[in-house]
Image: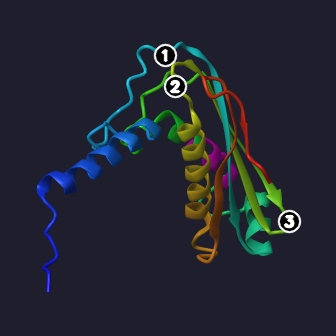
Amino acid sequence: MARARKPTRKTTKRPAKKAARKAARILTHLATSGEARMVDVSAKSATEREAIAEGRITMSPATLDLVMKGNAKKGDVLGAARIAGIMAAKRTHNLIPLCHPLAISKVTVDIVPDRKTPGLVVTASVKVNGPTGVEMEALTAAAVACLTIYDMVKAVERGMRIEGIRLIEKSGGKSGLYRAKD
């Protein structure tokens, strides 16, 4: 009975290195050897870039009414959530390890009621004129605005759900326009 040959070091390492190099070509935050790195954007042209992200928070009709009337014990829920979203967009590089600090030129956070669900729809839009996009900033703004809404009314309802954090649209840069399919 023949023994199975133990793979040599040379044959086991080559496919791993080849796979790491291939992944690095696709995933820009990976070096050819496979470790995480911050992308060098110094050679990229500064262009106008914008991203729009969305998130939803579902709650009972009574909690939604409380939020919309402005009667929450902690104060203006929607105002606090808007400010939190804007601040989060500006601080994304402190939260997401490989994001570049950006000189953001505009952030808007809009929050509208959805009586059918019931809940709130949060839409964050971020704009910059720079060498890299603002998708992460828009996503962070939407997520933190939803978290702030939760925090402001959790004493009334702990069963609220934050859902559907997603990129809706992005424009600018080499990859051009992206729009989410519904």
* Residue of label 3: 115
Left or right of 61 on screen, residue 78: left
| Image quadrant occupied by the C terminus | bottom right
Q: Residue at x 56, y 58 (%)?
A: 147
**Mark 3 residue type:** Arg
Tell me the tag on residue 82.
none
**Mark 1 residue type:** Lys
Q: Which of 177/25 is in front?
A: 25
Q: Quadrant of residue 37?
A: top left
Which residues are drawn in magenta? 77-84
Do labels 2 and 1 touch, CB within 8 Å? yes
Q: Residue at x 63, y 24 (%)?
A: 49
Q: Which of 141/96 is in front?
A: 96
Residue 81 part of the magenta segment: yes
- Residue 47 visible in rendering: yes
- Earlier residue among tags 2 and 3: 3
**In what element is the residue under mark 2?**
loop
Q: Main secondary structure of the magenta part?
A: helix
Between the C-alphas of marks 2 and 1, the distance is 8 Å
Between the C-alphas of marks 2 and 3, the distance is 37 Å
Q: Is 128 above or below relative to 21?
A: above
Q: Is 76 above or below relative to 3?
A: above
- Residue 86 visible in rendering: no
* Residue of label 2: 132
- Earlier residue among tags 2 and 1: 1
Q: Residue at x 51, y 41 (%)?
A: 88
* Residue of label 1: 44
Q: Where residue 106 sits: x, y (%)? A: 63, 26
**In what element is the residue under mark 3?**
loop
**Mark 2 residue type:** Thr
